[in-house]
Amino acid sequence: MIIDNILEVQDNIFMIRGVKNSSHSYVIKGIRGNILIDSGIDSNFHYLQSKLIQLGLKVRDIDIVINTHEHFDHIGANRYFQEHATIAAHRFAANKISLNDRYVTMYESGDLNTLPLHVHLWQESKSRFDVGNYVLDIIHTPGHTSGSICIYEPVKKFLFTGDMLFAGGVLSHISESGSVGDYINSLMSLNTRQIQEIYPGHGDISKNPAEDLRMAIESAREFLNEKETVSVTYVCNE
Ligand SMILES: [Zn+2]
């Protein structure tokens, strides 16, 4: 049950629902450190801070921020954490964030952030965070963007998906650095894992990931076929 925009999805793991155009944030209260997955948009920081306080945490109690990818609605409030917390992202995302590549991070969207953002830990697939009560494995899942990751908990078998996979298999937007082919490949690779629940960056959580994955793969294949038809028509008209 969601109370005040906070949902406890597992023991000591909380979803803070994103408002306005922000992504959700997830807080993992670990025995050996607290993790925030995605900080949301800059202009929502005070909202995020108030939700952390409701969970008994100050901003400085967050030890690690993991960004699921490089888009503004997931990284915008990083600057309030980056002086005391370790910021982690896949190296393809880290590169764009650190170089202040506004085009692909979509800061032109009008979010407030104007300060340089830093990434301390440039992640690869199979990196792991161990906070005692949970371990979190990084899986590189390019497609939505080149630097997209999912974060897998192998004991309870749940998955934080960012903008990679949504409840109901809603097709992810393929943005500038992304690729439909990579997206399908990443979905098929996720499909080989046992996943009980997914915790996405937008929308509802899902307890039926197998069906979400099946629908997303199907929609992405249809999307790819439509793109091919369009490009063949274009070539013929030339
Ligand atoms: Zn995104």
Image (spheres, helix red, strand yellow):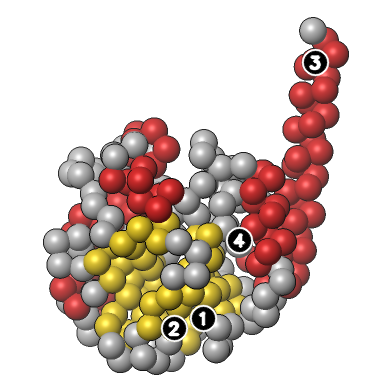
Is label 3 within 8 A of ligand 1 (CB to nearest ligand atom)? no
Mark 4 vs mark 2, foreground winner is 2
N-term-proximal mark, 2 vs 1: 2
Q: Amino acid at mark 4?
A: Leu
Q: Are marks 4 and 2 in contact (CB under 8 Å)?
A: no
Tag 4: Cα neighbours inside 10 Å, few (<14), some, or many (≥20)?
Answer: many
Residue 139 location in percent, x, y? 53, 66
Task: Verify CB contact (< 8 Å) between mark 2 and mark 1.
Answer: yes
Q: Secondary structure at mark 3?
A: helix
Q: CA distance from mark 4 to mark 2?
A: 21 Å
Is disc 1 placed on a helix, strand or loop? Answer: strand
User: What is the number of the mark on residue 235?
Assistant: 3
Q: Is residue 92 visible?
A: yes
Give 167 or 120, whichever is nearer the viewer. 120
Asked if residue 77 can be seen in this view, the reply is no
Callout 2: helix, strand or loop?
A: strand
| Residue 94 vertical placement versus 210 (above, below) | above
Q: Residue at x 72, y 61 (%)?
A: 188
- Gap in angstroms between the C-alphas marked 4 and 1: 16 Å
The quarter of the picture where residue 63 lies is: bottom left
Q: Which residue is mark 4?
A: 165
CA–CA distance in space, label 1 to label 3: 46 Å
Do the CB atoms of the residues marked 1 and 3 lie less than 8 Å apart?
no
Q: Amino acid at mark 3?
A: Val
Mark 4 or mark 2, which has the lower sequence index?
2
Q: Earlier in the sequence, mark 4 or mark 3?
A: 4
